[in-house]
Image (tube, rainbow, N blue to C red):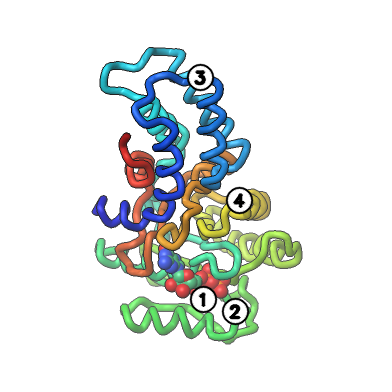
């Protein structure tokens, strides 16, 4: 399991680990020059200015608190610091307590929303829960068919209307159907939209308003899907979507295809919402619950 994660994070590990290794190899002291060089490496690995500075601040505090033991190095202290930075956002999604438990999936075009929905549906089905999907992406031609084909293959019901239909009305109907049938988990797809297109963001807010007319408690999870490969832009996506619909969890996808995995630290540090899942490939089992320790271990070699 861990080996697959490690392999998936290979490109990001090269980016971050190799630069750091030459700097901190065997080092047990942190002087200002070294701190600055570490910070530069973190910035180059897509942590962003603010988050890189925060890491250095936490690292300095950690080293001030206690001196390193015989086996510890600056590298092990840095790893511990990075885990510390992510720890609060390690909160797996629990779908008990509501029937249906409603997950609304949002994000920019091509982030991996529909794929993530397929993976989640597969996982929940494997766990013996009943799942229904709602084809809320009524905008992109073939989006409805993409979800319906997936549903047919895996025997999961899909509530859909034609392309061009009102997304809010599709999701309203789906919520009604899922409630009537006693389905455990309803996962709603939405059209990809750029965070700076205000009319599309308003439409998303409307989708949520309309669903809440039927049940004020939904969605129980508003899951933002972010493509790690978009780097720092993922952070502005996160903040804009959060402002419009209130993000309750994040899935960071395509970590396998990019050297920019460090952006996950920036997302965690700036959005401060749980990171529920990470995507490290296109197969169903490539969607993992996020573990801060595993992620940092997969990203940094021990030195
Ligand atoms: N390698 C890799 N590819 C992924 C991952 N997640 C999604 N993809 C791929 O990314 C592409 C886009 O995925 P979709 O799920 O269609 O993205 P979307 O957000 O629904 O896109 P729109 O509906 O057009 O907004 C597909 O080719 C997926 O196979 C991942 O974790 N790793
Ligand atoms: Mg889609």
Circle 3 residues within 10 Å: few <14, some 14–19, many ≥20: few
How many numbered discs sit on the rendered protein?
4
> Picture coordinates of residue 120 (x, y %)?
37, 64
Residue at x-position 36% and y-position 83%: 152
Circle 1 residues within 10 Å: few <14, some 14–19, many ≥20: many
Earlier in the chain: of badge 4 and badge 2, it is: 2
- The Cα–Cα distance between marks 4 and 1, rounded to whole angstroms, is 29 Å
Which residue has dot 4 on it? 232
- The Cα–Cα distance between marks 2 and 3, rounded to whole angstroms, is 56 Å
Q: Nearer the viewer, mark 4 or mark 2?
A: 4
Q: Nearer the viewer, mark 2 or mark 3?
A: 3
Residue 79: mark in rendering: none
The answer, for residue 176, to whether it is visible in the render is: no
Earlier in the chain: of badge 2 and badge 3, it is: 3
- Give the secondary structure at mark 4: loop
Which residue has dot 1 on it? 135
User: CB of mark 1 within 8 Å of CB of mark 3?
Assistant: no
Is residue 121 toward the left or the right of residue 236 in the image?
A: left
Which residue has dot 3 on it? 31
Earlier in the chain: of badge 4 and badge 1, it is: 1
Which residue has dot 2 on it? 138
Ligand 1 neighbours mark 2 (CB distance < 8 Å) = no
């Amino acid at each position: 399991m861990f080996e697959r994660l490690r392999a998936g994070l290979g490109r990001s590990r090269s980016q971050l680990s190799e630069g750091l290794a030459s700097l901190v190899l065997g080092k047990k002291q942190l002087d200002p020059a070294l701190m600055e060089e570490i910070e530069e490496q973190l910035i180059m690995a897509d942590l962003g200015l603010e988050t890189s500075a925060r890491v250095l601040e936490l690292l300095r505090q950690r080293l001030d608190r206690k001196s390193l033991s015989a086996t510890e190095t600056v590298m092990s202290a840095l790893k511990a610091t990075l885990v510390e930075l992510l720890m609060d956002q390690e909160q797996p999604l629990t779908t008990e307590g509501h029937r249906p438990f409603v997950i609304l999936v949002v994000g920019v075009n091509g982030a991996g929303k529909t794929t993530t929905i397929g993976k989640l549906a597969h996982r929940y089905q494997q766990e013996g829960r009943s799942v229904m999907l709602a084809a809320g992406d009524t905008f992109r031609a073939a989006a409805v068919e993409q979800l319906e084909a997936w549903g047919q293959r895996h025997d999961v019901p899909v509530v859909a209307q034609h392309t061009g239909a009102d997304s809010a009305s599709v999701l309203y109907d789906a919520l009604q159907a899922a409630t009537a049938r006693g389905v455990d988990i309803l996962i709603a797809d939405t059209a990809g939209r750029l965070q700076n297109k205000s009319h599309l963001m308003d439409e998303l807010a409307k989708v949520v308003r309309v669903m809440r007319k039927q049940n004020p408690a939904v969605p129980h999870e508003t899951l933002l899907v972010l493509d790690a490969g978009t780097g720092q832009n993922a952070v502005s996506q996160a903040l804009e979507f959060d402002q419009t619909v209130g993000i309750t969890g994040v899935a960071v996808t395509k970590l396998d295809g990019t050297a920019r995995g460090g952006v996950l630290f920036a997302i965690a540090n700036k959005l401060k919402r749980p990171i529920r899942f990470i995507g490290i490939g296109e197969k169903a089992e490539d969607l993992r619950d996020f573990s801060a320790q595993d992620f940092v271990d997969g990203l940094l070699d021990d030195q």
